[in-house]
Image: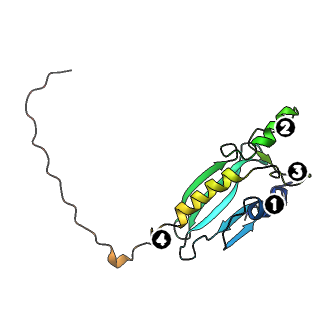
Amino acid sequence: MNPPTPGRTPIALHATDFFTQALDLPLDAAVVIGDTFYAAPAAASPLRLRIRFSPTIRQNVYSGLHLAVIHPDHGAIDSHHLTFADHGTFTARDERLHAEGHINLKPGTIRDGSAEGPPWAEGDFTGLQEALSQYVRMWFNTSIPPLTPLPARRIRVRGVTALPTPPADRTPRRPR
């Protein structure tokens, strides 16, 4: 386990409140650990969903959510980045801050460590919730069986069959 980054605590993003109240994800088997949300949306499936804040190049600044579908034996199967800007999450906040002359935060991002409350408090999560719901439906409401390795006895090794080689062309060619 990595030691915590100095000056950064999970409470700074208020991740538990974000995932359980702001996003209001209707997933039963779910838990928030630190800044990361884990869920098992389909009880019969070994696939798990992991959602975490997606960092930017700047320290403690986040541009969206990083989604990943995890299989216990095969690791990450798929990942996707949902940006706050693409889903209009902070458009109203950004327009207000720009009108007031506050240009210290890139549009569509949040910064943790705020003493005034959750950095995502002024967000409109409608577009983000819809995109997240589509992603969960795509991965967890399908009839595709879970990935499981085949038992060794069922794997058949076939002999290598040589392909016929084309006849050699013996016509003279023009030099290049």
Task: Report which quarter residue 92 is drawn in.
Answer: top right
Q: CA distance from mark 2 to mark 3?
A: 16 Å
Q: Nearer the viewer, mark 2 or mark 3?
A: 2
Q: Which residue in the structure is indicated by mark 2?
A: 97
Res 146 label: 4
Q: CA distance from mark 1 to mark 2?
A: 26 Å
Front-lying residue, 141 or 109:
141
Q: Position of residue 108 (x, y in %)?
A: 73, 42
Answer above or below: position of 116 versus 153. above
Q: CA distance from mark 3 to mark 4?
A: 42 Å
Q: Which residue in the structure is indicated by mark 3?
A: 114
Q: Which residue in the structure is indicated by mark 1?
A: 10
Q: CA distance from mark 1 to mark 4?
A: 33 Å
Relative to 39, is 166 on the left or the right? left
Sooner in the amino-acid sequence: mark 3 or mark 1: 1
* Helix, strand or loop status at disc 1: helix
Q: Position of residue 93 (x, y in %)?
A: 81, 42
Front-lying residue, 67 or 163:
67
Sooner in the amino-acid sequence: mark 1 or mark 4: 1
Answer above or below: position of 158 versus 153. above
Relative to 85, is 163 on the left or the right? left
Q: CA distance from mark 3 to mark 1?
A: 12 Å
Q: Residue at x 37, y 76 (%)?
A: 152
